[in-house]
């Protein structure tokens, strides 16, 4: 079942969850730069949001820098990745949430030939035990973006990367934003809303809309 919400195309997705700490900024945001060295942090030049290392949210995986040939053309969050060469299922735990509250979660993936192999991958993304999206990396420089609006059933949400045999899973960044309960009423304790596509239906120019 596909639903159109404003300029978002959203599909229904069941929710459920399970278990490291969440660190919010002053707005209640969690902004994680995956692969950043332990205790690393910075303020993004464009959004002015504070990004932190992912080491407090997960205890598996390896940190990498993307290939230098791609660094001049990408945002700072894409310069590092965390890859998962072992284990079928590796999960980030976003904690200190409010049970019953609504959140938007965004995950981004940019390969950037971080491993020097020039081998693209395909893997699955889950919220807890529930399928969210298949991530299909088809080139080195185009980011794949996944978004979901979900209701926290406990004081944490898990975001899991699952190896399906299509190559090594990896992730560039992970963001969480609290939402008002009055928004996206179709997102509730039994179903979430997964982004299919976002369209800019108004302007006639090529202005880029920045998110978050």
Image (cartoon, grey):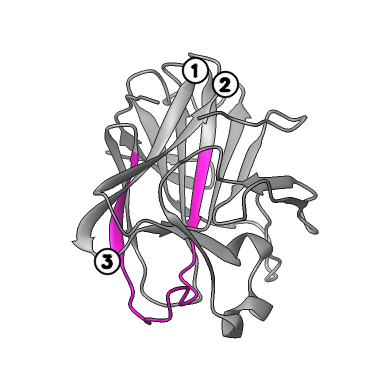
Helix or strand or loop: what does disc 2 sit on?
Answer: loop
- Near-viewer residue (11 or 21): 21
Question: Circle 3 sits on which residue?
Answer: 167
- Seen at 68% across and 79% down, the residue is 72
Image-based side of 176 in relation to 72, left or right: left
Q: Position of residue 205 (x, y in %)?
A: 70, 70
Question: Circle 1 sits on which residue?
Answer: 155
Q: Position of residue 42 (x, y in %)?
A: 76, 52
Q: Which residues are magenta?
A: 105-126
Q: Visible in this render: residue 176? A: yes
Question: Circle 2 sits on which residue?
Answer: 96
- Seen at 60% across and 27% down, the residue is 179
In the rendered view, tell whether residue 45 sits above or below residue 4.
Answer: below
Q: Position of residue 180 (x, y in %)?
A: 61, 22
**Cα–Cα span, label 3 and label 1:** 32 Å
Q: Earlier in the sequence, mark 3 or mark 2?
A: 2
Label 1–label 2 contact, CB within 8 A? yes
Q: Earlier in the sequence, mark 1 or mark 2?
A: 2
Helix or strand or loop: what does disc 1 sit on?
Answer: loop
- Seen at 51% across and 76% down, the residue is 141
- Near-viewer residue (53 or 14): 53
Q: Residues within 10 Å of mark 2 (few under 14, many from 20)?
A: some
Q: Residue furthest left?
A: 165
Magenta residue check for 29: no
């Amino acid at each position: 079942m596909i639903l159109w919400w404003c300029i978002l195309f959203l599909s229904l997705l069941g929710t459920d969850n399970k278990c490291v700490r969440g660190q919010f900024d002053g707005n209640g945001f969690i902004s994680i730069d995956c692969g950043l060295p332990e205790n690393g942090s910075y303020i993004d030049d464009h959004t002015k949001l504070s990004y932190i290392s992912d080491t407090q949210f997960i205890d598996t995986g390896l940190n990498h820098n993307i290939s230098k040939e791609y660094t001049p053309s990408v945002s700072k969050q894409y310069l590092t990745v965390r890859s998962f060469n072992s284990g079928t299922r590796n999960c980030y735990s976003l904690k200190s949430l409010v049970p019953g509250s609504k959140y938007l979660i965004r995950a981004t993936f940019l390969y950037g030939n971080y491993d020097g192999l020039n081998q693209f991958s395909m893997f699955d993304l889950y919220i807890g035990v529930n399928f969210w999206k298949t991530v299909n990396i088809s080139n080195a420089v185009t980011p794949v973006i996944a978004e979901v609006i979900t209701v926290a059933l406990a004081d944490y949400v898990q975001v899991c990367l699952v190896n399906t045999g299509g190559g090594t899973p990896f992730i560039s960044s992970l963001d969480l934003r609290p939402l008002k309960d009055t928004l996206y009423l179709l997102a509730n304790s039994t179903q979430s809303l997964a982004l299919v596509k976002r369209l800019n239906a108004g302007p006639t120019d090529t202005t880029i809309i920045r998110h978050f």
